[in-house]
Image (cartoon, rainbow, N blue to C red):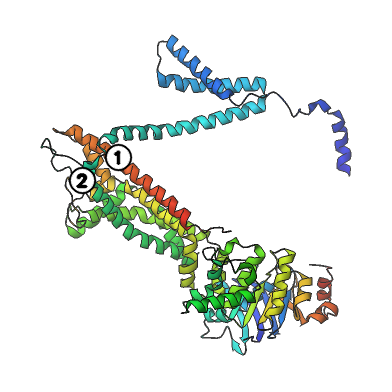
Amino acid sequence: MSKTVTTEPKRADQKPAMKEPITGHQLPKWSWVLFLAIGIGIAAGLLTLMETFSFAGSIALGVLVFLLLGFIVSAAVEGFRPAKDRLARYVVTSFFLLALLPLGSLLYEVVTRGAARFDWTFFTETQGNTHLMGVELGAMHAIVGTLMITALAFIISVPIGLFTAIYLVEYGASTKLASGIRFLVDVMTGIPSIVAGLFAYSLFSLILGPGTRSGFAGAIALTVLMIPTVVRSTEEMLKLVPNELREASYALGVPKYRTILKVVLPTSLAGIVTGVILAIARIIGETAPLLVTAGYFQLLNANPFSGPTSTLPVMVYQSLRTHGPRAEEMQMLGWTGALTLILLVMGLNLIGRLIAWKFAPKPGR
Amino acid sequence: MAKRIEIKDLDIFYGKFQAVKGVDMTIEPRAVTAFIGSSGCGKSTVLRSLNRMHEVIDGAYVDGEVLLDGTNLYGPNVDPVRVRRQIGMVFQRPNPFPTMSIKENVLAGVRLNNARMSGSEMDELAEKSLRGANLWEEVKDRLDRPGSGLSGGQQQRLCIARAIAISPDVILMDEPCSALDPISTLAIEDLIKDLKEDYTVVIVTHNMQQAARVSDSTAFFNLKAQGQPGELIEYGSTEKIFHNPDQKATEDYITGRFG
């Protein structure tokens, strides 16, 4: 009661005109086009006057002018608060486009340069005859190597990663062992890929003698990189399965291992598969560890257990730094290799999404 | 079918915290027993200790005896998995398995336990269980659709069908109607009355009218004070608890003077 008494006089002092009207002037939706055009125009004019005109320069300066112009005009017409909102929106959008710029430029560059050799011989020939003119060159050996090494890494790391995650969520929970494993997995996630490569290299050097290179050593290096990603994503997915489902299963007298196998895993299958595919997409483009472990070989070596094996990323690296009579052709091969790699990763991502959509528990009806 | 449960001096703990102290009671077969009491007084905990679901929670354990027709559920050499096959449970929120169809949900207890069964036997069991849960007429044309597509009340009856499909001796229900609308609640209450023909039914409820409507005996749980373990205050026929309770606390709770 006393509260209202004390606030009463203050209210009487306030003028009713302080309230903002709910209608006001508003700039049209397309006004940003105008601001941008004027901004770039002013910037281009200024740069021409200073005799330093460049296309990129006018865009960069033009965007700054555009932000300033939008803010000032909006403040004058719409008021200060809508102007701040507009400025924030323009800044966020500009930075988003700025972030897209390298990606777009990269894709453009790779596609235009790589398309030239994206033909049948690329997938059927090897780089065997770099000195003989007139013999067709291709990257079949590297494609086979990449698929083989990635498949090996997949076969080794998925069971290990999956079982580790199941232990962490279903059995370990909050025990000391589980938190220790979790910590180590986190550390492993941060390992630089070259360290994984050196680990595999020294492991195989110790066992099979110094300087040993093989596809299998490469697969082991990639496994070191892949396991933590699989553990982490699978653990998150298993944690998402509601405890109620586990309890429902236990209450039916279902043992724990069958509950995990028949209820928990199917429920989280979509997420687990997506996580695994993203992990593959992450390791398929690794270069440094493969350069150290699997090495480089210009012919097809389909035996992962002996001798160096080329992979696409390493092939790209080697092709682009080749000298010699057919260096130009080799460089074109390198670009096509990069394009193939991008398409592979994109394809894997698409498959991941497709599987996620297919396995996801449907709401029904 | 339908076995008697005797609880003897049961103390229930979550780690160091004692949730329930010194419960002694006998639950009669072929009858509905209701647990009532304010939130946090341990009635759900007692219910979960009756089919060894309590220990699923990390650090939870039980001290005392629960006898199912004379066999101590907490005795040596007792396999909790086998206990749960004889004492089914229905939870507060309907929880059908999202990856399974309606029929698969009903048969989950049988299929997940790897029982060998012919197709026609499975069809028969599914129909019998769904009829037992008063759901058959509503779902018989869409048995292969996901169980999560049903309404909340239908999902809960699906969970009851799932529980009775493994032909347990006892059915425990933990506030089975608290997430449902009045019509679905009525359907489940009718079902509970049918179930007691064959099973021992124990139901936890916050709804006193519901306890009065469906149960034969009622147990009232309460806390002495906040932070103290819950205790069984009074246990008797529903008639007596609701009209002529011995304890003052029971009368206060029933008449809505606290809790």
Which chain's residue wears label 2? Answer: A
What numbered label is drawn on residue A338?
1
Q: Residue at x 71, y 70 (%)?
A: B187
Amino acid carrying mark 2 in the image: Thr
Q: Depth check: B95 or B8 in front?
A: B95
Q: Depth check: A94 or A190 in front?
A: A94
In this picture, residue B206 sits left or right of residue A173: right
Density class for disc 2 (Cα within 10 Å; few <14, some 14-19, many ≥20) is some
Name the mark nearer the viewer: 1 or 2: 2
Q: Depth check: A225 or A314 in front?
A: A314
The N terminus of chain A - image quarter: top right
Q: Secondary structure at mark 1?
A: helix
Amino acid carrying mark 1 in the image: Ala
Q: Residue at x 62, y 20 (%)?
A: A73
The C terminus of chain A - image quarter: bottom right
What numbered label is drawn on residue A124?
2
Q: Where residue A154 sits in the image (x, y, percent)?
A: 33, 57
Q: Where residue A179 sits in the image (x, y, percent)?
A: 46, 61
Q: Quadrant of residue B23?
A: bottom right
Q: Depth check: A10 or A350 in front?
A: A350
Q: Residue at x 66, y 20 (%)?
A: A77
User: In the image as oriented, which residue stretches furthest toward the bottom?
Assistant: B70
Q: Quadrant of residue B59?
A: bottom right
In this picture, residue B85 sits left or right of residue A330: right
Q: Is residue B45 visible?
A: yes
Which chain's residue wears label 1? Answer: A
Q: Is residue B228 visible?
A: no
Density class for disc 1 (Cα within 10 Å; few <14, some 14-19, many ≥20) is many
